[in-house]
Amino acid sequence: MMGIILLGPPGAGKGTQAKKLTEAFSIPQISTGDMLREAVKAGTELGKRAKSFMDAGGLVPDEVVIGIVKERLSAPDCGEGFILDGFPRTIPQAEALDRVTGELGKEIRFVLSLDVDRKELMERLCGRRTCTACGAMYHVAFHPPKAPGKCDKCGGPLIQRDDDKEETIKNRLVNYNKATAPLLDYYKGTGKIRTVMASGEIDAIYASIVKILQ
Ligand code: AP5
Ligand code: MG
């Protein structure tokens, strides 16, 4: 049972590393950010509720996010493990996760804390591009697609995320420091936390993560 939490500020590379781990370990990526963006796009009740918080770079209320994660973790494809990307993000979410994994007989094995300096985070987020068709991630300078604006994997169109504007990014970073950084202390005593130096090459960071997991 390989339950993994990827913890780190906006732009730390949670999504990038989660996608690589998903392929290699055949366990699903559970990204609350991706699920919420899908709900916004589909115009569901959940999406309507979440949109204003996301546009402002704020956090969506705990009970909303906890509900979707609980449901997702109950799905059969989480039987061998899962990679939580962007959840938990507050102490109440971490407490709820402990309860839910207990109820479902699942276990978190590692909490990987991705450590990147703030200047680099800003550069990463301002240049990020995402494929609207398959979700693959690029960066205009650090990880450019072969043809501009077009996904290498599926040919789909690449877009910039709505919340990747400088002002919104600043709010996301403030909220990370305020609400999410305290989780490092929450997990300190559990023996599960590992710090990953997450500046540098994507593949080198991935290799250091794999080393920890083995
Ligand atoms: P979410 O989608 O989770 O956004 P985030 O936490 O701000 O993180 P990002 O997705 O921006 O960054 P990432 O760490 O995944 O980095 P990435 O791999 O893309 O959440 C969005 C919003 O949803 C929140 O603001 C909130 O409103 C809501 N929400 C979500 N979860 C919630 C929760 N649990 N509770 C409440 N609200 C919630 O990389 C970034 C860029 O850098 C890419 O372009 C990539 O190609 C590039 N890159 C990656 N690694 C490297 C590297 N090593 N070197 C150079 N470039 C790199
Ligand atoms: Mg992400």
Image: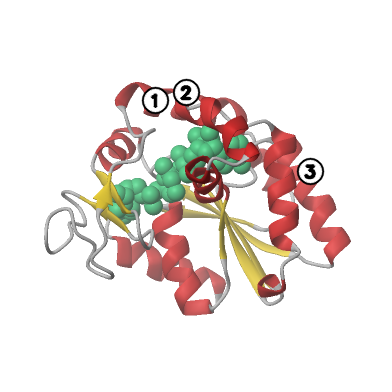
Residue at the extreme right of the image, as rendered: 103
In the rendered image, residue 137, in percent from the top left (x then y), is placed at 32, 56
Find residue 95 and name its label.
3
Amino acid type shown at disc 1: Thr
Residue highlighted by disc 1: 168
> Does the image show residue 181?
no
Residue 131 horizontal side relative to residue 149, left or right: right
Q: Is label 1 or label 3 in front?
A: 1
Q: Quadrant of the C terminus?
A: bottom right
Q: From mark 2 to mark 3, how far is it between C-alphas? A: 25 Å
Find residue 56 and name its label.
2
Q: Nearer the viewer, residue 29 or 102?
A: 29
Q: From mark 2 to mark 1, how far is it between C-alphas? A: 6 Å
| Contact flag, marks 2 and 1 (Cβ < 8 Å) | yes
Q: Please rate how many residues cluster around mark 1, counting C-alpha atoms within 10 Å: few if below 14, some from 14 to 19, many from 20.
A: some
Q: Please rate how many residues cluster around mark 2, counting C-alpha atoms within 10 Å: few if below 14, some from 14 to 19, many from 20.
A: some
Dot 2 falls on a residue whose secondary structure is: loop
> Does the image show residue 187?
yes
Quarter occupied by residue 134: bottom left
Q: Quadrant of the N terminus?
A: bottom right
Sequence-first disc among 1 and 3: 3
Q: From mark 1 to mark 3, how far is it between C-alphas? A: 27 Å
